Image (spheres, grey):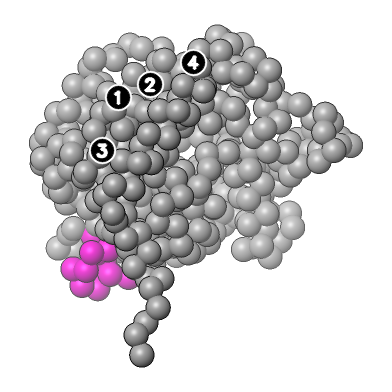
Amino acid sequence: MTLMRGIGDDEPLMSWLQNTIWPIEMSLGNEDFCHDGMMLSAVEMLKSGTTTFNDMYWHPSATARACTEVGIRAVLGMIVVGFPSSYAKDYDEYIQLGQSTRDKFLGHPTLHFSYAPHAPYTVSDEILTRLGDLCKAENRPLHVHLHETEDECNSSEVLDKSPMCHRSDFAGRPIQNFERLGLLNKNLVAAHAVHLRDEEIALLAEREVSTVHCPTSNMKLASGFCPVAKLLEAGVNVAIGTDGSASNNALDMVAEMKTAAILAKAVAKDTTAVPAATALKMATYNGAKALGLEEKIGSLQVGKSGDMIAVELGARAANTPVFDPISSFVYSSHGADVSDAWVNGQRVMRSRRVATVEEKNILEKAHTWVDKINALNLDPHPNHHPKET
């Protein structure tokens, strides 16, 4: 989604999707679009300290190809939605195309795959259950947007069949429905998990579900505030994510750590909530655990894969002096302080230059997509027009 960065900003989530994102994707979302966007994203992520990312998007084969060119590790979601797109026409084709890509890259050392139903309001119970069974059989993550907005939760609870209501005949909140369907387990990666009741938090902990906190996106889309401190206290594995750069509008995980830590303190009204070391763990080990990769990555240990970064602390005014390296990294640094990166033991960035690709060529190609998007003549801001009197 990086090629749509900055278009349709300041719109409500469903308006943003229906009026901007989905029309662009239906018109332009081919393999080239996904490949070129992924090349741009991969360079941005490496240069801001991300060596592994978790994705859910069209044409995962194009994404996989870009990842191998740049040298970044990825968990690629085999996306499934309940409507036709430029990628697939129906549920069966979404699944078949995803599995074909998975099989093509089977055994690749830095490419991993999940099943990725977009959200309860875009995927039916039958397909959710089918994908959950596949995840159990193959021991893969089930990556889904869950409890991102109040509308999603409230509409599903009363089953009003609005666009944000889950595609189910069960009147209840999506987490209740996921429990009913047997989907709450250690394979589930619940992106956002913003609107949670205490009993739902306890259930997520009991079922060993992982959640991914995306604070900047949640604030930008006015989705709400995730109760991170409560989740951690209950024993839920909470990772940090940026969400897509079309709704963030960056992929800077260093900046996201700070936002996650200070927002958690404000929500909990407790300065000790999510200290710097916890935020760092959420962005590293907890993320690896959510993706089922904690035995390979997420920490520097003998026998792991050698995914790591170097960060320059005390090299510029904004993060000098340094009394506590972890605090300086989380609270005083940003992605531009990352100087070097290694993936699977291979150096992919040296002195802020990505070693595997020419960044200039990637930027030039990205600029060509701006003209193509502008040529669609969309109105990304229907809610900003002055009202007639």
Q: Is residue 321 left or right of residue 99?
A: right
Quadrant including the C terminus: bottom left
Q: Amino acid at mark 3?
A: Gly
Numbered tag placed on residue 250 in the rendering: none
Q: Position of residue 315 (x, y in %)?
A: 82, 29
* Contact, mark 1 vs mark 2 (Cβ under 8 Å): yes
Residue that label 2 marks: 66
Q: Position of residue 197 (x, y in %)?
A: 45, 65
State how far apart marks 4 and 2 are (Cα): 10 Å
Q: Is residue 280 left or right of residue 164?
A: right
Is residue 161 a member of the stretch shown in magenta?
A: yes
What residue sits 82% from the left and 33% below the top?
316
Residue that label 3 marks: 29
State whether residue 138 appears in this view.
yes
* Contact, mark 3 vs mark 4 (Cβ under 8 Å): no
Residue that label 1 marks: 62
State how far apart marks 1 and 4 are (Cα): 16 Å
Numbered tag placed on residue 357 in the rendering: 4
Which-is-in-front pick, marks 1 and 4?
Answer: 4
Dividing the picture into quadrants, the one containing residue 73 is: top left
